[in-house]
Every structure is written in C-alpha cells, then in structure tokens.
Image (cartoon, rainbow, N blue to C red):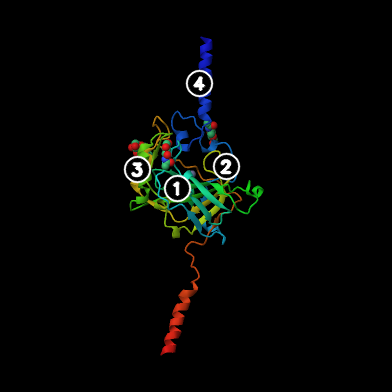
Amino acid sequence: MWRLLALLVFAAARTSAAAESHWCYEIQAEAPNQLCLGPSNWTGSCQKNRQSPIDIVTSKAKEDQTLGHFIFSGYDKKEKRNVSNNGHSVEVTLKNDNIEISGGGLPTGYQATQLHLHWSSEMNAGSEHSIDGKRFAMEMHIVHNKKVTGTSKSAKEAQNTGDDIAVLAFLVKEGPKENEGFWPLVEALAHIPKPGMDTEMREFSLWDMLPKEEKLRHYFRYQGSLTTPNCDETVVWTVFQESIELRRDQILVFSQKLWYDAEQRVNMTDNVRPVQRLGDRTVFKSQAPGQLLPLPLPTLLVPTLTYLAAGFLR
Ligand SMILES: *[C@@H]1O[C@H](CO)[C@@H](O)[C@H](O)[C@H]1NC(C)=O
Ligand SMILES: *[C@@H]1O[C@H](CO)[C@@H](O)[C@H](O)[C@H]1NC(C)=O
Ligand SMILES: *[C@@H]1O[C@H](CO)[C@@H](O)[C@H](O)[C@H]1NC(C)=O
Ligand SMILES: [Zn+2]
C-alpha cells in the first residue's frame, strides 16, 4: 500500500515537473489547471537584457543611411507549402524554397526557413512589437535563419556577432477589404486545430501576403532576440513601417480555429510576448517617414531644357 502511494506521489511529481518546465504564454499560464511557465518565468536567455519584442519610439530612432532597400529573391515563387500548428503558433515551412534576402543593411544574405504569426482577437493586442506604444492586431515573422555563405567575412568574424538570424516583421491591422493573398493560410487553419497537426496550403507566393515591394523601404532595425524560449540574442530585427491589412473576420479565424492544447480547452490567441526593455540598445530607421526626397535631376532638367529650347526656337 505504502509503496503504491509512494509510486503515485512520485509519478505525480514527475508529471507536474515536466509540465512546469514547459513554456507558455500568459493567457495559458493564467488558465485554470495549467502548470506551464509564463513569460516572466521563461528560462534560457529570456531574462537577459537584449531581448525582443520592444516598443519602438519613433522619435528616438536614429536615421542610418546604410539601411538601403532589400533584395528579395524567391518571394515571387508560387508554391504549395505545409503549415503546422506547433502549439504556440502556425508555422509555414519555407525551407526547401530557396527564398533569400540581402541588402537592407544586412551583413550577408539570409535564407528563409519559416514564417509564423502572433495574434489576438483584440485588434490592438496581437502584435509583439509596438510603435509609439501602439499595438496592432497581428504580427507576421518571416524567419531567415541560415546565413548564405560566400561572403568575404572570415569564419571567426561571422561567429557570435548576434546576427545569425534575420527576422522580417510585418504588423497587421484591420482593414475594410478582404486580403485575397491571405486566404490560402486562413483556409488551412480549420485543418490544424490541435498541436502537431499539419496540412498543405494551396499555392501562394510570399508577395501575395505582403505589402508592395516599393512600400518596404521604410523600416526599423535593432539587435534583439527570438521572442520564444530560449530567447537567443542572435536576431537582426527589421520591423517594416508599412502594415498588412486583413479584414476583421480573417483576423478572428486564427483565435477561433486554433487551440494550444489537444483537449481544445484554451483557444490559441494572445500568443504574444510582452515588450522588453530596450536598455542601452539603439533602434535605427532607414529614413525619416514621409521625408521629402531630393528631386531626381531629370525632373528639374527636362522643364528647364524645354523652356530653353522653346526660347531658342522662337
Ligand atoms: C512565475 O513568476 C511569478 C513572478 O513573476 C511567480 O509569482 C510565479 O509563482 C512563477 N510561476 C512559476 C510556475 O514558477
Ligand atoms: C507536406 O508534408 C507532407 C508530409 O508531412 C510531405 O509529404 C509533403 O511533401 C509536404 N509538402 C511540401 C510542399 O513540403
Ligand atoms: C474560441 O473558440 C470558439 C470556438 O471556435 C469561439 O466561439 C470563440 O469566439 C473563441 N474565443 C476567442 C477569444 O476568439
Ligand atoms: Zn515570432
């Protein structure tokens, strides 16, 4: 009898230890009978001081002329891709697609491996980054975590510089029109309600889901971390100023069709890490938003020449 009891106690202790050591979002930690670790108890590098996300204070962002435009490759490729419920988000696999970025002030090219999102059912609570204290409905992260080799940097220099991973962050807000480009993902959600499930999406390209390329010249840049454990401080963040717009119902589908747990007790929503202290870091910006560009020479020259020519011919 005592042995059985001891065994039971031991088993119970083991289960709860295992559950407690698993990380989760605040909304899960607050749910009844949950023993997971919420954001304030995340381990690994999560309690260090170069963490993400952050609030971006636009008036303090420092203009950096080296933050030029990005070169996107493979973003136009239309493919069927798999999407899974990984228990924390929905993740679209991009590994085998040769999708790459370079430029944008990055030290090298990077290859994309996956994209995923963060969201809420509240239109002002689903983004991880905030801009001047304002949060958005969702945030999409395109994770490029393979450096494209063949740069001039020596292997040693390329190590431990905190730029192993380049994440492009797109803020999503509610708009009046349906976003056609998001349907392949939104439709797939009903097929992956529980963690561990995956499904094939119908054909789409990354550009289908993103703002127009010419609108991606304005962005913020800082050094930070992954926003999930172990919160490695190895991320070069790019947060674009131009946001994606989805219709309200398209945003709400995420909170309605997805669950954190196999028992479908807690809707997958508010999968958002709270903002972290900026500390001694600087946020850079590509260019002052709305700043007047110097007029290109031909726009001045052509009228002048026309005027002169007209005068000469007269
Ligand atoms: C997590 O941290 C909070 C303090 O932020 C503490 O009150 C709570 O007991 C901790 N929970 C666990 C499971 O360790
Ligand atoms: C999706 O996953 C299935 C099995 O999990 C695999 O057979 C298939 O090739 C994958 N499709 C793509 C486009 O990666
Ligand atoms: C949770 O899911 C149910 C079932 O889809 C839905 O009715 C409810 O609105 C969801 N809750 C939130 C906060 O979206
Ligand atoms: Zn993310």
In the rendering, at what x and y percent does residue 88 appear? 46, 38
Query: Dot 3: few (<14), some (14–19), or many (≥20) neighbours within 10 Å?
Result: few
| Sequence-first disc among 4 and 3 | 4
SS under mark 4: helix
Q: Which residue is mark 3?
A: 187
Kindly check if marks 1 and 3 are in contact, taking CB atoms under 8 A apart as contact.
Answer: no
Q: Which residue is mark 4?
A: 12
Label 1 vs label 3, nearer the camera: 3
Q: Is residue 255 left or right of residue 130?
A: left
Q: Is residue 270 left or right of residue 221?
A: left
Q: Which residue is mark 1?
A: 139
Residue at 46 percent of width and 57 percent of height: 216
In the rendering, at what x and y percent does residue 241 appear? 47, 56
Report the Cα–Cα distance between label 2 and label 1.
Answer: 19 Å
Residue at 45 percent of width and 47 percent of height: 140
Query: Dot 1: few (<14), some (14–19), or many (≥20) neighbours within 10 Å?
Result: many
Residue furthest to the bottom: 314
Report the Cα–Cα distance between label 3 and label 2.
Answer: 32 Å
| Sequence-first disc among 4 and 1 | 4
Report the Cα–Cα distance between label 4 and label 1.
Answer: 38 Å
Amino acid type of the residue that numbered disc 4 sits on in the rendered structure: Ala
Q: Which residue is mark 2?
A: 232
SS under mark 2: loop
Is the CB of the residue bearing disc 2 within 8 angstroms of ligand 4?
no
Report the Cα–Cα distance between label 2 and label 4.
Answer: 32 Å
Amino acid type of the residue that numbered disc 3 sits on in the rendered structure: Glu
Label 4 vs label 3, nearer the camera: 3
Residue 23, compared with residue 281, is above or below; it is: above
